[in-house]
Image: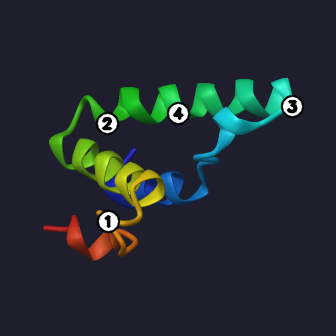
Amino acid sequence: MDIVEYFEALGHHDWTYNYSDDHRAWTKGLAESTRLQSIAQENTTLLRMYKDYADYVFNPIDSPEKPKLEDYLP
């Protein structure tokens, strides 16, 4: 998976799956989260992208701006 595909996957990921009452949605979200984290471990740029996106979603006061793909391209 290249940087563009990974960034798009982060944007489509259900970051709030953990709050779902639907077990199927929770299971799907957990699997996708695990997959994205696993992929990120292979590349420092992808890991930074994952952390920045997670901070944007879960810590909006500390990370008020949505990450942009351009910030990660060489």
Question: Most extreme residue toward the front, as rendered?
Answer: 61
Q: What distance separates the C-alpha of mark 4 from that of mark 3?
A: 16 Å
Q: What distance separates the C-alpha of mark 1 from that of mark 4?
A: 20 Å
Residue 63, numbered label: 1
The residue where tag 4 is placed is 33
Query: Taking 38 as reference, is 21 left or right?
Result: right
The residue where tag 3 is placed is 22
Q: What distance separates the C-alpha of mark 3 from that of mark 2?
A: 27 Å
Instruction: State yes or no: discs 3 and 2 in contact (Cβ < 8 Å).
Output: no
- Residue 37: give x, y in percent of width and height: 39, 31
Mark whose residue sits in front, 4 or 3: 3
The residue where tag 2 is placed is 40
- Residue 65: give x, y in percent of width and height: 36, 75
Q: What distance separates the C-alpha of mark 4 from that of mark 2?
A: 11 Å
Residue 34 against residue 74 in the figure, above or below? above
Q: Residue at x 22, y 71 (%)?
A: 71
Q: Residues within 10 Å of mark 1 (few under 14, many from 20)?
A: some
- Residue 20: give x, y in percent of width and height: 77, 36
Query: Taking 18 as reference, is 67 left or right?
Result: left
Instruction: State yes or no: discs 1 and 4 in contact (Cβ < 8 Å).
Output: no
Mark whose residue sits in front, 4 or 2: 4
Query: Taking 22 as reference, is 32 left or right?
Result: left
Instruction: State yes or no: discs 4 and 2 in contact (Cβ < 8 Å).
Output: no
Classify the position of the C terminus by image quarter. Answer: bottom left
- Give the amino acid at mark 3: Asp
| Mark 1, secondary structure of its residue | loop
Q: Residue at x 52, y 33 (%)?
A: 33
The mark nearer the N terminus, 1 or 4, is 4
Classify the position of the N terminus by image quarter. Answer: top left
